[in-house]
Amino acid sequence: MCGTQYRPHADSGAGAVEQTITVRREDGVPVAEGLVHDFATMRFRASFLGDAPEGNTVLIAVTSTSDEPLVSVLYQLGDQAIGDVDFAGRHGFTGLHYVTHDGALLQFWCDA
């Protein structure tokens, strides 16, 4: 599960949209696109491969709506259960991330 908050104007909470996004586990060949969620100026993608050679693997990518790369983060957790990793502040195995683009702000974190 990934939590997101999108703010159209990074310096203001006015118009903020919060979404909880459930990412399904894929076994075998990873799905190239994974889960995709569009916001006004950014696109959030997440894939979870449960049996990768490196163990549990999660890929998070944020792009512009025209697919210009903004942030890409790969989490290779080995054999450790994703639910066993948790940063302070209850921001799961990813911690809390901030991405800005065209004056907007997207915050995301993922946990199991």
Image: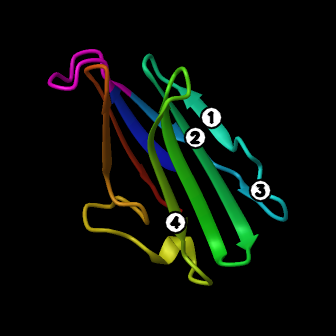
Contact between marks 3 and 2 (CB within 8 A): the answer is: no
Residue 34, how many percent across, how many down?
Answer: 69, 44
Numbered label attached to residue 75: 4
Q: Dot 2, how many residues are within 10 Å of its Cα: few (below 14), some (14-19), or many (20+)?
A: some
Out of 63 and 9, give the one closest to the viewer. Answer: 63
Q: Residue at x 34, y 60 (%)?
A: 95
Q: Find numbered disc 4 in the image and state the secondary structure of the residue it sits on.
A: strand
Contact between marks 3 and 1 (CB within 8 A): the answer is: no
Disc 1 designates what residue? 36
Q: Find numbered disc 3 in the image and state the secondary structure of the residue it sits on.
A: loop
Which residue is outermost to the right? 28
Whole-number angstrom distance, CA of label 4 to CA of label 1: 18 Å
Disc 3 designates what residue? 30
Q: Residue at x 53, y 50 (%)?
A: 60
Whole-number angstrom distance, CA of label 1 to CA of label 2: 5 Å
Is 112 positioned to the left or the right of 106 in the image?
right
Q: Is residue 92 above or below residue 102?
A: below
Q: Earlier in the sequence, mark 3 or mark 4?
A: 3
Q: Residue at x 48, y 60 (%)?
A: 111
The secondary structure that dominates the magenta segment is loop
Q: Amino acid at mark 2?
A: Arg
Q: Earlier in the sequence, mark 3 or mark 1?
A: 3
Q: Dot 4, how many residues are within 10 Å of its Cα: few (below 14), some (14-19), or many (20+)?
A: some
User: Residue 11 lies in magenta, yes or no?
Assistant: yes
Q: Find numbered disc 1 in the image and state the secondary structure of the residue it sits on.
A: strand
Q: Is residue 58 above or below residue 45?
A: below
Q: How are the colours assigned in the image? A: rainbow
Contact between marks 1 and 2 (CB within 8 A): the answer is: yes
Is 22 positioned to the left or the right of 28 in the image?
left
Q: Which residues are magenta?
A: 7-17
